[in-house]
Image (spheres, rainbow, N blue to C red):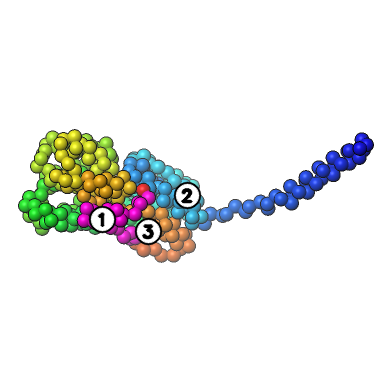
Amino acid sequence: MGKWSKKICRCLCFLLIIIMTGGCTKPAEQPIEPKLLLGFSQIGAESAWRIGNTRDIEEQAEKYVVSLMLENANQKQENQIAAIRRFIAYKVDVIAFSPIVEDGWDNVLMEAKNAGIPVILVDRDISTEKEGLTTCLIGADFYREGVMAAEYLIRKADSLSMEHVNVVEITGTENSTPMRQRQAGFMDTIANDPRINVLESIDGDFLKSRGAECMRQLLETYGDEIDVVFSHNDEMTLGALPEIEKAGFYPGENMIIISIDGGQKAIDVLKKGKINCVVECTPKLGKELMETALKLKAGESVDAVIHPTEQVFSDEQDPSTIEPRGY
Ligand code: GYE
């Protein structure tokens, strides 16, 4: 091949490549415009429940094409207040948050109201004298959970023909809605049963390490007087169980264990017989949150309270029928 024909051949190949690659290139994908900007202040990552809740909200935001500004407050109210202020400065369409405790939100929520940004409470409630600071609450009926835990205990005491039932209660974060309402539901329900007596209620802050500490303390004080441990979440229960065993007791056999949440780890322990009852509290609130936020952006009205339906897992049923929990 001559020098010129080689050059022409190279040029033709080059052109062919350009034409081919040009023909193969997909048209640039149009970015999907998010339907709204949602600021969400999460409490922290203290439990499998909380981690599952965060994951669910992230997944549902993606599904509903909602742009999510998620801030983790590491268990501090002041971090949540700062996050809400950032959301206001950012002019998000809707603010959502899970208040770690019930009090102390008036000022920041007033600021959101003045900025015209609707606020959704997720999981926990607030206590306020002011009207119209929030639009709705999407979260579990914690009072009902306490009632279900107590009703299980009454059935269990009947089935074992117990005459005296001494309970120790390890509670969640003081002044948080689940702590207050789970306790109230439980206490109101056992109030009519003279067999049942609560020896002590102790603050475990929803943490595994605190659950262990509290249990050690309770065992030192009451020892074999304890018939029942009622713990406000799985994490504290999982912290308490090894302490009970170390003290020579058999949880699930000579000490009745009642927990709340229903995360996979606790259900696995229930299947082994070391937990007697777990009242479900679902962290899957993301779908309702996205739908409610979209309605608010569209100016539609929303339900004031949205409670998911929940069930009880216990040694009264065949535990092999419990489906994987996903958190
Ligand atoms: O039970 C606990 C978590 O507010 C329902 O907080 C939630 C509670 C849940 O840390 O595990």
Q: Residues within 10 Å of mark 3 (few under 14, many from 20)?
A: some
Tell me where residue 243 appears, x and y as whole percent: 20, 36
Q: Earlier in the sequence, mark 1 or mark 2?
A: 2
Q: Which residue is mark 1?
A: 318
Range of residues picked out in magenta: 305-326
Amino acid type assigned to the residue bearing label 3 in the image: Thr
Q: Closer to the observer: label 1 or label 2?
A: 1
Tell me where residue 127 appears, x and y as whole percent: 28, 52
Tell me where residue 135 appears, x and y as whole percent: 37, 58
Q: Is residue 325 covered in magenta?
A: yes
Q: Earlier in the sequence, mark 2 or mark 3?
A: 2
Q: Residues within 10 Å of mark 2 (few under 14, many from 20)?
A: some
Q: Could you tell me if the residues under marks 1 and 2 are in contact, i.e. CB atoms within 8 Å?
A: no
Q: Closer to the observer: label 2 or label 3?
A: 2
Classify 296 as above or below 207: below
Please tell me in which quadrant of the rendered image residue 205 appears: top left
User: At x 85% / y 44%, what residue is drawn?
Assistant: 12
Q: Is residue 112 covered in magenta?
A: no
Say whether residue 101 is visible.
no
Q: Is residue 10 left or right of residue 215?
A: right
Q: CA distance from mark 1 to mark 3?
A: 41 Å
Question: On the rendered image, what quadrant is the N terminus found in?
Answer: top right
Q: Which residue is mark 2?
A: 68
Q: Which residue is mark 3?
A: 135
